[in-house]
Amino acid sequence: MASLLKIRFLIQRKFLNSTAKFLSSKSSAVASTSGQESADLMELSSEEINKRLMTFFDLPDNWIKEEVKSGRGWRIEELRIKSNSDLHKLWYILYKERNMLMTMEQAAKDEVENMVSPERLVKVEDSMKNIEEVIKERNRAYWQLEVGDSSPVERRRVFRRDIFGRWRMIACSEHLIPYWMNSEWRKFNAPGFGADVINFNRRFNEIQLNRRMSQLLKQQFYCRQLLKRFPNIDLDHLQERFPDIDIKHIKDNNDEYTLQNRISRFNQIFYHKKKDI
């Protein structure tokens, strides 16, 4: 694996030297407008580029090892005693380590080999989750002290439609692939829908409304029966149990509701008898 990685990822010195010379000569032609850029290109060396590129990979000595020993992840108790600046530095250290491990994981997949000590990636991700949890705790404490609200918006969320035209609260997250390149994501998450989806939403909303109305009617009937059998029932408790029902209105007009139900029931029975005749 080590030899394959070297062949695949290390850039040849001659190619980089020729590229740097070409860029430096091209930039020197426009030195009047970009003198600083040409100086930067001349200072650029292949060794520096190799060092920058190899930061995305593990140490070469670890490529041939069967196991790389690593410590445990950071615990929440240990992170709570650190300052915000220390957490900020530790976050980017773990972020860089995670990028390196993900690169090694992808390289191992390309070479159809097992990654060396894959548990390191799990430890890094757990440590980053613990850091984020500590930051959330501090944000909640700050909001509770300064604003009086203990539930701040911890991560930005947007109200958008999905592919079925339904409104959903979608949490903003980091995308590893740009929007215009991620065709698989756009198939299921891209905005926009056709007439079939609009027709589906109309029928779906009608079904939801009918279910809601049926539920409310059942609750009203249940409350009327309770008030009829127990006139001295606690109205406040009944209102808390059924917040969508106006209990006071039902109690004041319970006799009228009962009369209307009797009339409608009689008409229904009379209609069926007349139909049978």
Image (cartoon, rainbow, N blue to C red):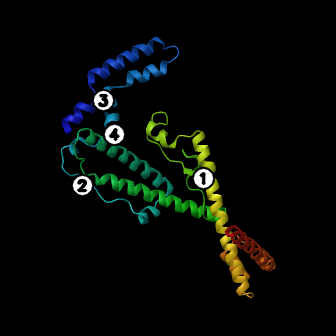
Earlier along the polypeptide chain: callout 4 or callout 3?
A: 3
Looking at the rendered image, the disc whose residue lies closer to the viewer, 2 or 3, is 2
In the rendered image, the vertical position of residue 218 relative to residue 31, given as above or below = below
Which numbered tag is attached to residue 166? none
Q: What residue type is labelled 4?
A: Phe
- State the image coordinates of residue 38 (x, y, percent, origin top left): 44, 19
How crowded pointer 1 is (Cα within 10 Å; few <14, some 14-19, many 20+) is rated as few
Q: What element carries label 3?
A: helix
Disc 3 to disc 1, how far (Cα)? 63 Å
- State the image coordinates of residue 179 (x, y, percent, origin top left): 49, 37
Which residue matches tag 4?
56
Earlier along the polypeptide chain: callout 1 or callout 2?
A: 2
Earlier along the polypeptide chain: callout 2 or callout 4?
A: 4
Which residue matches tag 1?
204
Q: Is residue 182 visible?
A: no
Q: Image quadrant for the C terminus?
A: bottom right
Disc 1 to disc 2, how far (Cα)? 56 Å
Q: Nearer the viewer, residue 35 or 205?
A: 205
Which numbered tag is attached to residue 47? 3
Q: Nearer the viewer, residue 195 or 140?
A: 195
Q: Is mark 4 on a helix, strand or loop?
A: loop
Write the residue at 48% across / 61% down.
134
Disc 2 to disc 3, how far (Cα)? 29 Å
Which residue matches tag 2?
69
Q: Nearer the viewer, residue 246 or 7?
A: 246
Q: Can residue 35 be seen in this view?
A: yes
Q: Nearer the viewer, residue 149 or 111?
A: 111
- State the image coordinates of residue 22 (x, y, percent, origin top left): 37, 15
Earlier along the polypeptide chain: callout 1 or callout 4?
A: 4
In the rendered image, the vertical position of residue 21 relative to residue 58, given as above or below = above
